[in-house]
């Protein structure tokens, strides 16, 4: 990873997020961002962390001062941890071996109930159908998934015990079906491009991973990128 280019890209993005106000990444800030590069934080992961900080900052009301990159550190590292869990890539400490493990579910979002989750998924599915991102041939399948999720939503608040567990398992199955549909709709060219991007993201970890672990991590990362590119909702509820 070219550290200087990495820092320039983040500086340019931070300038854009600050409405053109230039915040230079020099001195301690350069050391901080260089550490992200050394840890293997993919550029788009770092940018997502910056976005997360700005979203929270905007919710507090009108901005009073430009945001420095140092303020974004916690969010960048949080997003990086989430990315590693999703891809199965973990690193215990500097210099330790990097391995690929089964992807762990992200922490459950506080305050989001199953009915609320399903409502959001239905909105995203409606948007997905409207954009035609998966093609017209996918519409009947999306309609079927939406209909099933709507039935689940109407009774989800009262689900308990085995019935709830069965419902959650079914949501996982539907999520897998949606990913399979997206994979088919994307086509070989797009999938090749996404897998190349995923492989590039994992490059800093490749030398310390077994070949099978690399292949598994690349596939999980590629599916995550495909989900983001097409705007697919996550139907699974953790």
Image: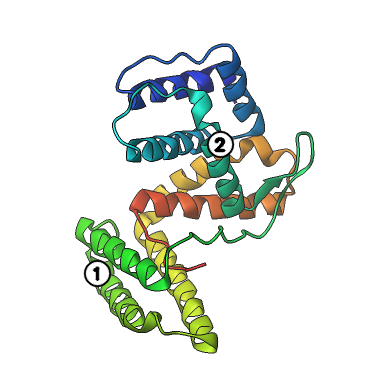
Residue 6 lies, in percent from the top left, at 52, 23
At 42% across and 16% down in the image, what residue appears? 23
User: Seen in the image, is 129 located left or right of residue 209?
Assistant: left
Select label 1 or label 2 by which is in front. 2
Quarter of the image where the N terminus is located: top right
At 29% across and 71% down in the image, what residue appears? 142
Residue 231 lies, in percent from the top left, at 34, 54
Label 2: few (<14), some or many (≥20) within 10 Å?
few
User: Seen in the image, is 132 located left or right of residue 174?
Assistant: left
167 in relation to 50, above or below: below
Name the disc covering residue 108, or none: none
Give the mark nearest the N terminus, 1 or 2. Answer: 2
Is residue 135 shown to the viewer in this render?
no
Name the element at disc 1.
helix
At 61% across and 47% down in the image, what residue appears? 84
Is residue 159 shown to the viewer in this render?
yes
Seen from the viewer's position, the closer of residues 227 and 218 is 227
183 in relation to 172, above or below: above
Q: Quadrant of residue 147?
A: bottom left
Seen from the viewer's position, the closer of residues 233 and 78 is 78
Residue 112 lies, in percent from the top left, at 42, 64
Badge 2 is on which residue? 74
Label 1 – label 2 distance at C-alpha:
40 Å
Name the element at disc 2.
helix
16 in relation to 94, above or below: above
Residue 37 lies, in percent from the top left, at 60, 28
Label 1: few (<14), some or many (≥20) within 10 Å?
some
Seen from the viewer's position, the closer of residues 234 and 226 is 234
Badge 1 is on which residue? 139
CB under 8 Å between discs 1 and 2: no
């Amino acid at each position: 990873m070219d550290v200087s280019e990495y820092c320039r890209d983040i500086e340019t993005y931070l300038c854009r997020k600050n409405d053109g106000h230039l915040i230079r990444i020099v001195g301690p800030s350069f050391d901080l961002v260089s550490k992200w590069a050394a840890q293997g934080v993919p550029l788009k992961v770092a940018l997502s962390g910056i976005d997360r900080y700005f979203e929270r900052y905007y919710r507090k009301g009108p901005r009073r001062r430009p945001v420095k990159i140092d303020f974004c550190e916690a969010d960048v590292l949080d997003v990086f941890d989430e990315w590693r869990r999703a891809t199965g890539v973990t690193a215990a400490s500097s210099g330790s071996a990097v391995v690929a493990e089964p992807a762990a579910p992200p922490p459950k979002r506080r305050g989001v109930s199953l009915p609320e989750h399903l409502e959001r998924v239905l909105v995203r599915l409606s948007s997905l159908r409207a954009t035609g991102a998966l093609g017209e041939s996918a519409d009947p399948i999306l309609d079927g998934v939406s209909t099933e999720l709507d039935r689940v939503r109407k009774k989800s608040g009262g689900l308990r015990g085995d019935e709830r567990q069965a419902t959650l398992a079914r949501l996982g199955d539907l999520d897998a079906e949606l990913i399979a549909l997206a994979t088919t709709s994307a086509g070989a060219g797009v999938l090749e491009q996404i897998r190349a991007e995923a492989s590039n993201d994992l490059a800093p970890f490749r030398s310390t991973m077994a070949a099978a672990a690399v292949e598994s991590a690349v596939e999980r990362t590629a599916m995550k990128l495909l989900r983001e590119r097409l705007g697919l909702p996550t139907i699974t509820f953790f």
